Image (tube, rainbow, N blue to C red):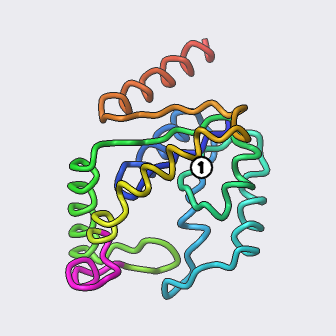
């Protein structure tokens, strides 16, 4: 099983991808962890593709993220794409909660990077502001990607509610149990 979980920031990609990877007993791969270097420095495209080639060389994995610059590489190997397309109000609520929590706790993310309350409340780098500006644009972008003919061999699963996300997880969980019996 090779799955890519996509969707806008705050939709629950990481949580869902981690759960599926753990439940299926396959590696979990987080694009942000491969992309970000210390001091919020981005990896070069070559560095990122080299890391991706290494971690996606196996036959089973769950990939969390949707960087368009690596999609031609990742979607050549993927079997399923799960598009978490939750409503705007849920995503905005999650982004606000996540931003405040990370800011208060000083939670370390990738390569020692941390987000601050100041960043989320008073700068243009705010994920809250980013969500307000980009949510609908990203939804249209992901919708367009899943309908491209060159990706017709990939199974696309679009989940539009928290219940649909839970139902999908439960379905895969019951399939894994029946296959193991």
Figure check: 41 above or below 127 = below
Residue at 59% x, 71% y is: 35
Q: Which of 88 and 27 is in front in this view?
A: 88
Figure check: 124 above or below 58 = below
Horizontal and vertical percent for residue 2?
67, 39
Figure check: 14 above or below 134 = above
Residue 118 colored in magenta in the image: yes
Horizontal and vertical percent for residue 15?
41, 48
Horizontal and vertical percent for residue 138?
44, 56
| Number of numbered markers | 1
Q: Quadrant of residue 10?
A: bottom left
Quadrant of the frame with the N terminus: top right
Residue at 60% x, 11% y is: 181
Q: Nearer the viewer, residue 158 or 2?
A: 158
Q: Which of 70 and 114 is in front in this view?
A: 70
Residue at 21% x, 69% y is: 100
What's drawn in magenta, residue-wise? 115-127
**Left or right of 50 in this view: 113:** left
Q: Nearer the viewer, residue 37 or 23?
A: 37
Find numbered disc 1 in the image and state the secondary structure of the residue it sits on.
strand
Residue annotated with mark 1: 63
**Left or right of 123 in this view: 3:** right
């Amino acid at each position: 099983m090779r799955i890519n979980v996509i969707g806008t920031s705050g939709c629950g990609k990481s949580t869902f991808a981690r759960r599926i990877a753990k439940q299926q007993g396959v590696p979990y791969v987080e694009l942000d962890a491969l992309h970000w270097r210390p001091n919020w420095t981005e990896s070069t495209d070559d560095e990122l593709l080299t890391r991706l080639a290494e971690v996606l060389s196996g036959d089973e994995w769950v990939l969390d993220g949707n960087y368009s610059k690596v999609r031609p590489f990742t979607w050549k190997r993927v079997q399923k794409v799960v598009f978490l397309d939750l409503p705007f109000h849920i995503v905005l609520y999650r982004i606000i909660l996540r931003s405040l929590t990370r800011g208060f706790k000083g939670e370390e993310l990738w390569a020692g990077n941390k987000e601050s309350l100041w960043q989320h409340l008073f700068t243009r780098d705010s994920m809250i502001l980013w969500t307000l500006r980009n949510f609908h644009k990203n939804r249209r972008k992901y919708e367009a990607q899943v309908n491209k003919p060159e990706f017709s061999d990939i199974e696309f699963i679009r989940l539009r509610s928290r219940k649909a996300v839970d139902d999908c997880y439960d379905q895969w969980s019951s399939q894994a149990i029946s296959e193991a019996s």
